Image (spheres, rainbow, N blue to C red):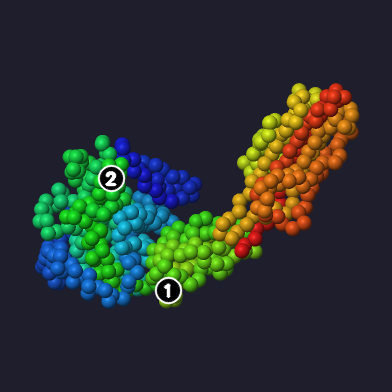
Amino acid sequence: MVASVLLPEEGKKYELRLSNANTHLYTVKEIPRAIYDREDSPETAAASEIEGPAAEARRAAFTSPALLSSTATSMATATDTSGILDVMFLFTPQALTTIGNTPSAMKALVALSLQIGNDALRNSNAPLRMRSVGTFAINDSSHIETNFRDELIRLRYDFDGFFDEDMKQRTALGADVVVLFVASTSYCGIAYLWATKDLALAVVSTQCPDSVSHEIGHTIGLDHDRFSTHDYDYSHYNFGYCWDTGPKSCYRSIMAYSSCVTTNRRTNCPRGLYFSSPLTTQGELGRTTGIATSDNVRVLQEQASRAVNWLPSKTTGGMIFSVEPGYSVVGRCEAVTITGWSLGQSASDIVSVSINGIPVDKIISQSADSVQVLTALSSTPGTGDVVVTASNGYVTTLRASFTYQAKEGDFTMDFESGSLNAFWESTGTLAWSVQRYCDSLPCSAKPQTGPSVGVGGRGNFAKAAAYDAIGSTAQMTARFSTHNTGCTELVSKLSLYYHMWGPQNSACKGELRVEMQSVQSLTWSTILIAAMLQAKQDDPWLPLEYTFPAPADVLALRITAVPYTGIPSCFYWGSVSLDNVTVSKTTTCA
């Protein structure tokens, strides 16, 4: 696991990383601002270094509104219309050392980097998402890092003895962009601006996972803020931006530098998860995250299709970001929401969903980027894949993302925790108290009425004490949920043990009854009343059980104890005690 934490008010950033894979020890440390605030200026390769126009010429061409429109039109017939940028990640030996030198650490850093970028793209309503199509340690274990620019040039050229074998995987994987992670902290990253396919490359420090989306932004054509680039040609609009979020706070977009200056003359703003756009607002002041001449999202809208077609994609389907909830119980159906990107081409394009290899019971609702389903009743516990299939045959899979847990046993409250379980709540005019078991006698906590110990000769139990207020009651109420998606919890049985002893006259005994509310009737109805009582204090606990004729659509169960019935001839009244209160539930799916 890798995590990055930013505290905007303090202007501090921390990272959580695995420091010892054997002991699963993690460390938290602050990242110096001099590191995480600093990406190098994007590389603008000289004409003599590349075939075709220089990067500055490409920038001028692509920022011309007329050419931007024609470029977008020419890409309308591109083969990849998913809006997904496929990225391959490489790690130098030194980079691996900084993160724990394990495959899981590599994947965790990549996942964090992509989550930051995709969150920013989503927050900005940008027509693009990024996914990993491969994560590898470089082939040359003796490689020694130099500087960011050198590593970028080494990535770029074939047959120079650097990354040659690694870059062969790019075509096989259909990676539009290649990102190399390095250990160096002299910068956070570097990339080519307005890249072609051969220049869609970036180098990023392992200390700066949020710089992955920044550097990839450069390859597509996004630049830093105007203040940092000193570019005041207002026919260009591919710049980052910073804005005031409150009277004393501000943010900068993914592409902006910390030297960016807001309208209220604030600077050193922490990075927010937004690409600049005049159409998106953020913060209590309601300021936009961009303006017409600083609009990264417009560039993404115009250039995304060009970027995602740098190489033909070898991965069909879209992306799944979340599965909520990510589990269910064997024998129970569950309403599950799957959220992603390009799961289908329209709001009705998803034709089937399977979870752990089992087709779902039904699709409740869907859009191009999400689908809500009702799971089928599984009989086997385990973790498996979520698979979404669209009408064009494209399949989107999220591996090992849903778990069927072993079937719930009967839910039993034995009071050993010292209180009522959260499943039940105490109601009525008298409170239930938990009587604790004493291991040795004489026991100062031994009640004067009621049992000495719980069921089985030891353990805690619940007691409603006797008071001389006629009609006083102690109640336990359990409420059940009915899912409006077609899943319904049904109650099949209630069982418990009770103890009522104390009065000399059996007519003076307390009363114990069980009531229910159902979907059909919200009126409490009595389904069971205890008919026996103990003859003396240490007589055994008595069982009380009710089996519903058919599993019932119960909204709530209530156990009511009335310790004092108000009969004048009674000298004292007995407490009512309960133990091992058990509810058996089943679930049906409509």
At label 1, counting other C-alpha atoms closer than 10 Å, the crowd grade (few under 14, some 14-19, many 20 or more) is some
**Left or right, residue 278 beside residue 385:** left
Residue 383 in the image: state x and y as whole percent.
Answer: 55, 61
Q: Is residue 43 visible?
A: yes
* Residue receiving disc 2: 286
**Residue 394 image label:** 1
Residue 224 in the image: state x and y as whole percent.
Answer: 19, 53
- In the depicted view, which residue is nearer to us: 423 or 487? 487
Inspect the image, locate mark 1, and give the three-letter code of the amino acid beneath it: Tyr
Q: What residue do we see at 65% from left, 60% from top?
A: 588
Q: Earlier in the sequence, mark 2 or mark 1?
A: 2
- In the depicted view, which residue is nearer to us: 486 or 28? 486
Q: Is residue 358 above or below residue 228?
A: below
Q: Is residue 463 above or below residue 270?
A: above
Find residue 506 and report its image quarter: top right
- In the depicted view, which residue is nearer to us: 572 or 94? 572
Residue 460 in the image: state x and y as whole percent.
Answer: 73, 35
Q: Is residue 82 above or below residue 408?
A: below
Q: What residue do we see at 18% from left, 71% from top?
A: 70
**Residue 506 image label:** none
Q: What residue do we see at 52% from left, 59% from top?
A: 336
At label 2, counting other C-alpha atoms closer than 10 Å, the crowd grade (few under 14, some 14-19, many 20 or more) is few
Inspect the image, locate mark 2, and give the three-letter code of the amino acid beneath it: Gly
Q: Is residue 185 visible?
A: no
- Secondary structure found at label 1: loop
Q: What residue do we see at 60% from left, 59% from top?
A: 487
Task: Measure the alpha-carbon separation of dots 2 and 1.
Answer: 40 Å
